Image (cartoon, rainbow, N blue to C red):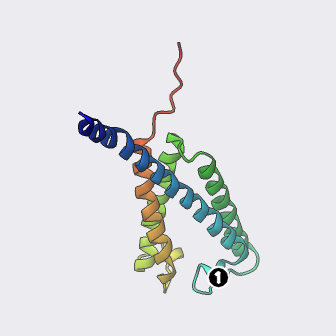
Amino acid sequence: NILAFIEIFVRRIAIPVLLEAMLTLVTYVGALFEIVVGAAFVFSPEALHNGYKPAPGMESYAFELFGIACVFWGLLTACKATDKAILAFNVLWNAIWAAYLYLIFSGIAWRPQVAIEDGSFAFVPLIAHGVFAVNSLLAFLMAPSNKVKTS
């Protein structure tokens, strides 16, 4: 029966393939997000932090180091967007950032050195990292194992 064949094709092949493609696309969007944010941390951190400019010296150095790390994580994620190990780390990266940014946004300092009066700047990256965490988890669950078969 042709209708039964179409139903099986859609449920077992088309939907999983489309879902995997969509998850991979969002993984690439997340990688681009990391690269753009990383560049902003280096060249214009005030654009990300309600106009706050890091002080010259060690504070600017720390912002730049983090920016460089974001750029490289974004590049690695873009190059290995379907790799199960990278997706697992991407789940952790985004979930930890979402949790941390939630604390900042909510005004809850996990230690006195990071008490911030106005954490409203954390809202957009909190949502972005939350979306990317869920996407990475789903992509991880759908990705084939990286194990190499030996004869």
Amino acid type, callout 1: Glu
Label 1 sits on a secondary structure element that is: helix
Location of residue 112 in the rendering, given as x and y in whole percent from the top left corner = 49, 76
Q: How many marks?
A: 1
The outermost residue toward the right is 57
Judge left or right: residue 18 versus residue 9: right
- Residue 17 is drawn in which quadrant? top left
Residue drawn 70% across the image and 61% down it: 68
Location of residue 120 in the rendering, given as x and y in whole percent from the top left corner = 47, 83
Q: Tell which of 135 and 2 is nearer to you.
A: 2
Judge left or right: residue 141 versus residue 59: left
Does residue 88 lie above or below 45 as drawn? above
Location of residue 63 in the rendering, given as x and y in whole percent from the top left corner = 67, 70
Q: Tell which of 26 and 35 is nearer to you.
A: 26
Q: Mark 1 highlights which residue?
A: 46
Location of residue 113 in the rendering, given as x and y in whole percent from the top left corner = 54, 75
Does residue 79 lie above or below 37 as drawn? above
Residue drawn 33% across the image and 43% down it: 10
Q: Can residue 146 be spotted in the picture?
A: yes
Residue drawn 30% across the image and 40% down it: 6
Does residue 63 lie above or below 15 as drawn? below
Q: Can residue 110 be spotted in the picture?
A: no
- Residue 40 is drawn in which quadrant? bottom right
Q: Tell which of 35 and 13 is nearer to you.
A: 13
